[in-house]
């Protein structure tokens, strides 16, 4: 078995802010689509609630603007910090067109891959996360635990999962999600997300090192 947590690589992220629900102006949405063209968003679709989705499916870029939601999904092309900055810049541009004095919650999601050598990711996680597989026998033959989910409450609902990537058995996928309720101003958003990103780069990486190290 060979795994080096320094090879953990962020692949995609999502940043979400929740405003108090309010109708959107269709003219403003069309202008926003023009404004956001520089972020390689090429497709404009409307939503049933009077919002819009701007996307570039080929590049896995998506921006959702609805009366009760603002959400940006981006690939991580260089590093997570740069993609996070781009997502916050997009939300800031939306804010200039649809101003909100106070948002009521924010969310941050990050997906990362970790290559595994010498055995499948499922086998590795089964050995490390569930060294005692006996309880799974109660579920029937051929059942085994191959991943885990951790739930934290210190800074609002905060979860991360560590599982084999179904599309590629040589990789582990780590999925980190934090939702922070409570009123905040848009100027606070970058700091909120950067704190979660530091958790990913430090505590979460150290956790994976402890979980997966040794034979």
Image (cartoon, rainbow, N blue to C red):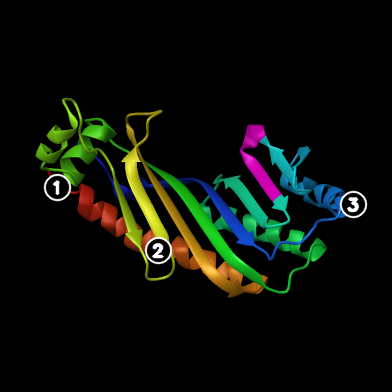
Q: Which residue lies furthest to the top in this view?
A: 141
Q: Residues within 10 Å of mark 1 (few under 14, many from 20)?
A: few
The residue indicated by pointer 1 is 214
Q: Are marks 3 and 2 in contact (CB under 8 Å)?
A: no
Q: Where is residue 71 in the image (x, y as percent from the top left)?
A: 64, 53
Mark carried by residue 27: 3
Residues under labels 3 and 2: Cα distance? 40 Å
- First in sequence: mark 3 vs mark 1: 3
Residues under labels 3 and 1: Cα distance? 59 Å
Q: In this view, does 77 lie above or below 169?
A: below
Residue at 68% x, 47% y is: 63
Mark carried by residue 199: 2
Residue at 68% x, 73% y is: 102
Pair 3/2: label in front: 3
SS at badge 2: helix
Task: Please give left or right for residue 184 compared with residue 161 in the image.
Answer: right
Q: Where is residue 23 in the image (x, y as percent from the top left)?
A: 80, 58
The answer to if 132 sits in the magenta stretch is no
């Amino acid at each position: 078995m060979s795994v080096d947590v320094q090879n953990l690589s962020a692949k995609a992220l999502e940043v979400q802010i929740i405003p108090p629900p309010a109708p959107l102006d269709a003219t403003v949405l069309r202008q926003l689509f023009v404004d956001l063209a520089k972020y390689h968003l090429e497709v404009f679709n409307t939503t049933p609630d009077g919002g819009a989705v701007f996307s570039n499916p080929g590049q896995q870029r998506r921006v959702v603007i609805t009366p009760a939601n603002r959400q940006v999904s981006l690939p991580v092309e260089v590093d997570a910090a740069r993609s996070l900055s781009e997502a916050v810049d997009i939300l800031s541009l939306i804010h200039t067109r649809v101003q909100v004095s106070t948002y009521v919650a924010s969310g941050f999601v990050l997906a990362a891959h970790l290559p595994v050598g010498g055995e499948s990711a499922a086998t590795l996680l089964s050995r490390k996360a569930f060294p005692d597989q006996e309880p799974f026998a109660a579920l029937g033959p051929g059942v085994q635990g191959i991943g885990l989910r951790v739930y934290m409450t210190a800074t609002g609902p905060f979860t991360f999962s560590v599982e084999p990537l179904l599309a590629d058995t040589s990789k582990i996928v780590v999925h980190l999600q934090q939702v922070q309720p409570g009123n905040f101003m848009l100027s606070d958003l970058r700091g909120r997300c950067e704190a979660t990103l530091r958790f990913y780069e430090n505590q979460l990486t150290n956790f994976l090192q402890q979980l997966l190290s040794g034979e």
